[in-house]
Amino acid sequence: MSNNRVWFFIRKSLLGGLLILLPISIIAFFFKWIYDAVTGLIAPFTGLVVRAFGLPRFAADWVVVAVLVVFCFLVGTLVATKLGGWIWQRLEERGMARVPGYRTVKEVITQLFGGSQDSLMRGEVARVWLYGRQVSVTVLGLITSRHDDGVLSVFVPTGPNPTSGFIYHVHESLVERRPDIGVEQMMKTVVACGAGSAALLKRGEVTERG
C-alpha cells in the first residue's frame, strides 16, 4: 500500500470519527453548561435541602428543580385567573416596571418563548428580494410587522446565531410568504449557515407546480 493511500485512509478515518464524536461532544458540553449554570443559581436552595434531608447534592439539585417547576406552574395558573392577573398587573405597573431594564428583558423573553401573538416564534416565514425582483438575491426571514402603507418589517437572522440579525422594511411586492416552511425549520438552516435551505425552497416550488 502506497504512502498516499495510507494517509488517505488515516484522514478519512479521522474525519469519520470527528463527524460522529464532535456533534455528540458539543451537545454534551452544551447540556453540561446549562446544568452548571442552573445548579449554580439554585446552590443556596440546594444547600438547604442537603442540610435538612441529608440528600446527596445531585439528588438535592433535582429536588429543587422539581420544586421550581411546580412553583412556576402554580404562579402561571394563578396569573391566568382574573384576580391573579389583575393583582400581577398592578404589582408590575407600580413595582417591576420601574426597575431599569425590566421591560426590555421581558419583551425579549416573551418573543423567544412565544408568550404573545406577535412572538418571533409565531412569525410567518417569507422569502424577500432585498434589491428588487430583477436581482436574483433573496433571503429567508420572518415577517414581524405590517404597516398601513403596504410595507412589511422582516427580521432576517444571521448564522450561526439566529437571535441576532437585521431588520428590513420592504414593500410587500418584494415579499413571498412561505407557509410551507415552519419557523423552526428555517432556524435550523440559519444555525447550519444555510445548509438545508435548498430542500426547503425546492419543496415550495414542487408544491406550486402540483
Image: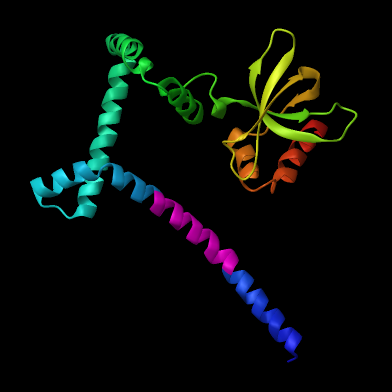
The C terminus is located in which quarter? top right
- Front residue of 47 and 116: 47
Please identify the residue farthest to the bottom as the structure is shown: 1
For residue 22, above or below residue 148: below
Q: Residue at x 73, y 89 (%)?
A: 3
Please identify the residue farthest to the right as the structure is shown: 134
Is 25 left or right of 167, judged from the image as shown? left
Is 187 left or right of 25, judged from the image as shown? right
Kindly indicate the quadrant of the structure image that contains residue 130: top right
User: Where's residue 97, x and y in %?
Assistant: 38, 16
Q: Residue at x 20, y 42 (%)?
A: 44
For residue 149, above or below residue 115: above
- Front residue of 21 and 164: 164
Check if residue 138 falls in the magenta segment.
Answer: no
User: Where's residue 22, x and y in %?
Assistant: 54, 63
Kindly indicate the quadrant of the structure image that contains residue 28: bottom left
Is 147 left or right of 76, judged from the image as shown? right
- Front residue of 78 and 4: 4
Check if residue 31 falls in the magenta segment.
Answer: yes
- Extent of the magenta region: 18-33
Kindly indicate the quadrant of the structure image that contains residue 174: top right
